[in-house]
Amino acid sequence: RFAPIVGAKAPKLEFPRVRVGITGLLGSAAAALSGKPPTISYAMARISNAGCYYSSEKARRELNLPDIPIDEAADECFAWLEKQGYVDAGK
């Protein structure tokens, strides 16, 4: 869903958790040896495998959070990240 918004290609394959972890370990090791930041670090791999999914029901109920379609929310999120300078505006 986010790939078209950020101007990237969507992943075509789903990797097993173990493979993601090993890739992160190798990325962190290569970064430690080269001094360059890794494309995928062990910390990134662990976070991507964490399975952190939460319900927004409480926020909707107690804070009147608007219930908008995910694609619209993603567009708004990326626009805000661009405005704050967290992502390259050129996508």
Image: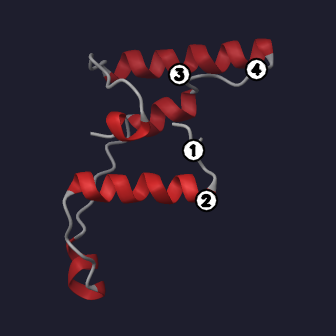
**What's the distance in space between the residues labelled 2 and 3, CA to CA?**
28 Å
Disc 1 crowd, CA 10 A, few/some/many (<14, 14-19, 20+): few
Q: Residue at x 44, y 51 (%)?
A: 78
Of residues 34 and 74, which is closer to you in this image? Answer: 74
Instruction: Check whether the beta carbons of the residues at disc 2 and disc 3 lie within 8 A of each other.
Output: no
First in sequence: mark 1 vs mark 3: 3
Task: Give the x, y percent position of residue 17.
Answer: 34, 24
Amino acid tagged 3: Gly
Residue 4 appears in which quarter of the rendering? top left
Indicate which label's residue lies in the foreground, 1 or 4. Answer: 1
Left or right, 56 with reference to 80: left
Indicate which label's residue lies in the foreground, 1 or 2. Answer: 1
User: Which residue lies under the disc numbered 2?
Assistant: 84
**What's the distance in space between the residues labelled 1 and 4, CA to CA?**
24 Å
* SS at circle 4: loop
Amino acid tagged 1: Ala
Q: Is residue 74 above or below residue 30?
A: below
Amino acid tagged 2: Gln
First in sequence: mark 2 vs mark 4: 4
Figure label count? 4
Indicate which label's residue lies in the foreground, 2 or 3. Answer: 2
Task: Give the x, y percent position of residue 74.
Answer: 33, 52
The circle drawn on residue 17 is none
